[in-house]
Amino acid sequence: MNPIDSTCLASIYDAEVAECDHPNIAILLCTMQGKSYLREQLDSILHQSYKYWTIWVSDDGSNDGTHQILESYQCQIGREKLSINSGPAEGFATNFLSLTCNANISADYYAYADQDDIWEKDKLTRAVRWLKTVPAHVPALYCSRTCNVDIHNQQIGFSRLFLKPPSFANALVQNIGGGNTMVFNETARNLLRAAGFDVAVVAHDWWAYLVISGCGGRVFYDAQPSVRYRQHGANLIGANNSFADSLARIRLLLGGRFKIWNDTNIRALEGIRGRLTSENRIKLDQYSKARHSSFFLRLLLLRQSGVYRQTLLGNLGFIVAAIFNKI
């Protein structure tokens, strides 16, 4: 038997290192009556430049042919690449969190996926590139801007570009990352699992931003769009990027909806209070106390908490809401 020469050994070693250098991504895809656009989303995942992924689907009771589409793709790429599961049928946020907390799913990174979008080919590649710069023991969340498209995948604009840094002080009053753009590491996933899939939250993506930033994690907002975000009549949450949308959000602030959302998020955060950094516990307490304080103390505590929204109009709306005690 001829000995393996050093060149061959080096090639084997390089191949093993290269394989280890490609973290596995669990794509968490939730569906509900998704027949209309699901094939385009699945095709965009199959055509990703980054190939080290598996798809975990949680369907919330579709009866429109969604299952048949999923099964056809499962036959095409194999059960080891696409797993189909039944969701809890308690709304989109709980469906996504049920996948996040599913003990049968194990990966290095996790990516949320909606049923009706189209991923840019390099979406996962760019997310992995940034996530690999963060030590594995540090919670990390990647999110990005989106390219908004109509039902025919024709571009109609972009989501609002956020320029201020992501932080817990921002997350307390605003979500900057759509779940359809989010990719996070195992340490971040463990924080979300600790909170549980049945925690009452406004939205799974806002909750991820709150938890990961609040517990000392790193959040990166990519100004380059990674998703073609389809706008159609069945959207549960739209793009919200026009001036009219900004005014609509201000009306929500003044109408009391934002106050209800705050009640929900703060109640959920109290459940993981011990995992928040000491600095962020103080911010949470200051913000919570401000919401129930008299006028001048309310404004003082809000200033001390450092909470902020990303845009001038958003901050002006927040200040007005605070003045009228609608936060």
Image (cartoon, helix red, strand yellow):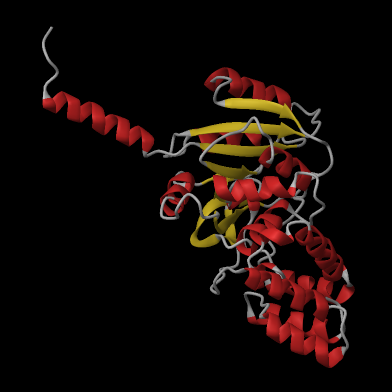
Farthest residue in the bottom direction?
296
Q: Is residue 134 left or right of residue 148?
A: left
> Which quadrant of the figure has residue 260?
bottom right
Q: Nearer the viewer, residue 96 or 117?
A: 96
Residue positioned 70% across, 64% down in the render = 240
> Which quadrant of the figure has residue 19?
top left
User: At which x and y percent is residue 55?
Assistant: 58, 32
Residue positioned 63% across, 26% down in the render = 83
User: At which x and y percent is residue 316?
Assistant: 72, 84
User: At which x and y percent is residue 114?
Assistant: 66, 43
User: At which x and y percent is residue 67?
Assistant: 72, 25
Dividing the image into 4 quarters, which one contains the C terminus?
A: bottom right
Residue positioned 61% across, 63% down in the render = 213
Determine if residue 115 is in view: no
Location of residue 215 with respect to 8 vertically, above or below: below
Location of residue 302 with respect to 89 vertically, above or below: below
Farthest residue in the top direction?
1
Q: Nearer the viewer, residue 40 or 108?
A: 108
Q: Nearer the viewer, residue 61 or 7?
A: 7
Dividing the image into 4 quarters, which one contains the N terminus?
A: top left
